[in-house]
Amino acid sequence: MRTYFSSTFIEKEVLNEAGIYYPIKLDYYKIINEEEINKQEKAKFGIHVVKTEYKQNDTKVENKKIPYVSDDEETIENILQILKENVVTPIAVEDILQDFTKEIIL
């Protein structure tokens, strides 16, 4: 199951600098692994990031799910807030989470 956390649009100026002239929205979701947690020893919470490009006459959607990140809901919500504030896209979310893991371990 996933629950909506937040969304943001990439700023128009940032898009224009990259030569993109259409809106891009990022949605962030918290994944809750209720059924699987009883069967496996995996993290209870994960993250799902969805990028929607609103091109003229077309909509393109890209997404990335990372189903097992943490057992702590507060940690997941903090990570989601950081992802939103830094406008992290689906293509970069896995690398960013690996950096978080390194910081937690160190």
Image (cartoon, rainbow, N blue to C red):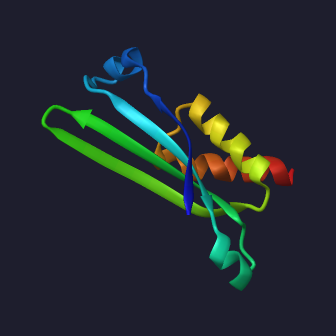
**Residue extending furthest top?**
13
Q: Position of residue 6 (x, y in %)?
A: 55, 37
Q: Position of residue 16 (x, y in %)?
A: 32, 18
State which quadrant residue 57 falls in.
Answer: top left
Q: Is residue 76 left or right of residue 11?
A: right
Question: Which residue corresponds to the image point at 36% horizontal and 50% vertical from the top-left?
Answer: 62
Pick whichever, 55 or 4, lies toward us: 4
Q: Is residue 80 left or right of residue 60?
A: right
Question: Which residue corresponds to the image point at 55% horizontal and 58% vertical from the top-left?
Answer: 2
Q: Is residue 26 left or right of residue 2?
A: left
Residue 94 vertical placement versus 39 (above, below): above
Residue 56 vertical placement versus 101 (above, below): above
Quadrant of the snapshot with the N terminus = bottom right
Q: Is residue 34 left or right of residue 4?
A: right
State which quadrant residue 83 falls in.
Answer: top right
**Residue extending furthest right?**
106
Question: Which residue corresponds to the image point at 79% horizontal and 56% vertical from the top-left?
Answer: 72
Question: Which residue corresponds to the image point at 37% horizontal and 18% vertical from the top-left?
Answer: 12
Q: Position of residue 34 (x, y in %)?
A: 66, 71
Q: Position of residue 87 (x, y in %)?
A: 52, 32
Q: Is residue 40 visible?
A: no
Pick whichever, 58 or 33, lies toward us: 33
**Residue extending furthest left?**
57
